[in-house]
Amino acid sequence: MEIQKHEINHFMKLSFLVLLFSFIFSISNAQDSTLQTVGNFSLSRDGKIAWRKCFHTDLLEKGFLNEIETKNILLNLSTDSFSITGDLKPIDPDFTGFRPLQRPIRLAQGQIVARVAIKLEEAEYCITISDIFYKQLFDYRQRRKGDMTNLERGLIRRGHFIREFELPTGVILNNTFEKVFSGL
């Protein structure tokens, strides 16, 4: 009788451990697909960079859409109930607080273009910027005027942002996007 109790206890402990490890494994696989974040930027497991931020607004849907059209910051504007998508009009990076030698050359020589999705919710709007590119403004070495370079190229290594992205590139882009989209 004593041996059976010992075997049952051992079996129960082993079953508990198997269930525990299965639970932990399922949670870790079910987590968000975001691999890394830097400020408002996130890097997904498939190597895509996106910038996300929500802002407060007192405008209703109609007034908000009018404000977007008045600011003239999006091309190919498309609207749906409570959402707006479009292409960011080429914008210059905001280098406020950075001396010329601190500015990454790829940003200093170009403009930023991207895909923008805006969700309007009660008293706030959330911006998601993806497919971010640099548009070369003039010929320089191998780059030609008008060349488009994806932000993900050169700023991600082995599934992580490189140090240059964390400071200064990410900070400059974050400041630029906040300046463009705040106060709508």
Image (cartoon, rainbow, N blue to C red):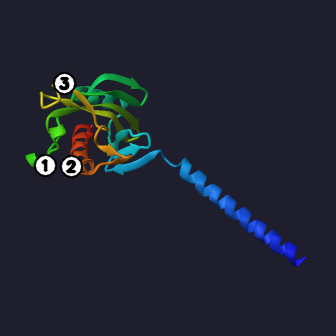
For disc 2, the marked residue is 168
Q: Secondary structure at mark 2?
A: helix
Quickly name the residue at label 1. 102
Is residue 62 shown above or below 171? above
Seen in the image, is 41 located left or right of residue 80? Answer: left
Q: Nearer the viewer, residue 163 or 181?
A: 163
* Nearest the eye: 154 or 81: 154
Above or below, 104 against 10 in this view is above
The residue under label 3 is 146
Q: How many marks?
A: 3
Q: Distance of mark 3 from mark 1, alpha carbons? A: 24 Å
Question: Could you tell me which residue is drawn at 41 percent across and 31 percent down?
Answer: 82
Element under disc 1? helix
The residue located at (15%, 25%) in the rendering is: 145
Where residue 162 appears, as percent x and y from the top left, is 29, 49
Q: Quadrant of the N terminus?
A: bottom right
Residue at image x 24%, y 28%? Answer: 148
**Mark sitting earlier along the chain (2/3):** 3
Q: Earlier along the polypeptide chain: callout 3 or callout 1?
A: 1
In three-dimensional space, the C-alpha distance between marks 2 and 3, rounded to whole angstroms, equals 24 Å
What is the spatial separation of the Cα atoms under label 2 and label 1, in whole angstroms? Answer: 7 Å
Residue 61 picture quarter: top left
